[in-house]
Amino acid sequence: MHLFTDGAVERDNGNASTGGVLRDHKGIRMTIIQTDNLEVIRVLQDNAMADLGITMLRRVQRIMRAKGQWRIRYIPNECNLVADYLAKLSFAWRSSLHVIDVAPNKVLEFL
């Protein structure tokens, strides 16, 4: 299973968002998180960072400890365009979570 992630921040108001794409490879028991943010990789791999009081960080680290084998890998931004697009698209939505079953046309252009 591969999880591609990216984040975005609106500079004018400071709102932050994240997007992700989950690709399932049947029969594989390892999950690989791929992101273009080296700081996120460093923080997720550093167990001492869990004490910073960042709720999302603590939750992700707890899931990673409980759910089997995980690997975090850096990928260049140009290889992470779908997650980047979804992170920016979510600024237009007013609810906190959207699950997309059918890829938007713009996402299909990246593939």
Image: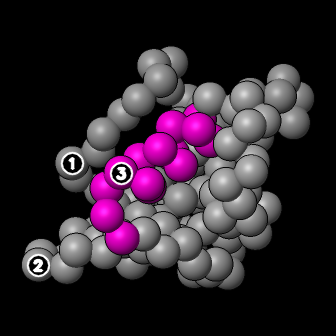
Q: Which mark is residue 66?
A: 3
Q: Is residue 30 left or right of residue 89?
A: left
Which residue is tagged 2? Answer: 27
Image coordinates of residue 99 in percent, x first then y, are 30, 39
Give the magenta part as a residue range.
56-69
Please tell me whether residue 26 is drawn above or below residue 8 in the rendered image.
below
Secondary structure found at label 1: loop
Write the residue at 35% across / 51% down. 66
Secondary structure found at label 2: loop
Image coordinates of residue 60 in percent, x first then y, are 51, 45
Secondary structure found at label 3: helix
Look at discs 3 and 1 and give the one toward the viewer.
3
Q: Say which label, 2 or 3, has the lower sequence index.
A: 2
Q: Is residue 90 left or right of residue 111?
A: right
Which residue is tagged 1? Answer: 101
Q: CA distance from mark 2 to mark 3?
A: 19 Å
Q: CA distance from mark 3 to mark 1?
A: 27 Å
Please tell me whether residue 23 is drawn above or below residue 99 in the rendered image.
below
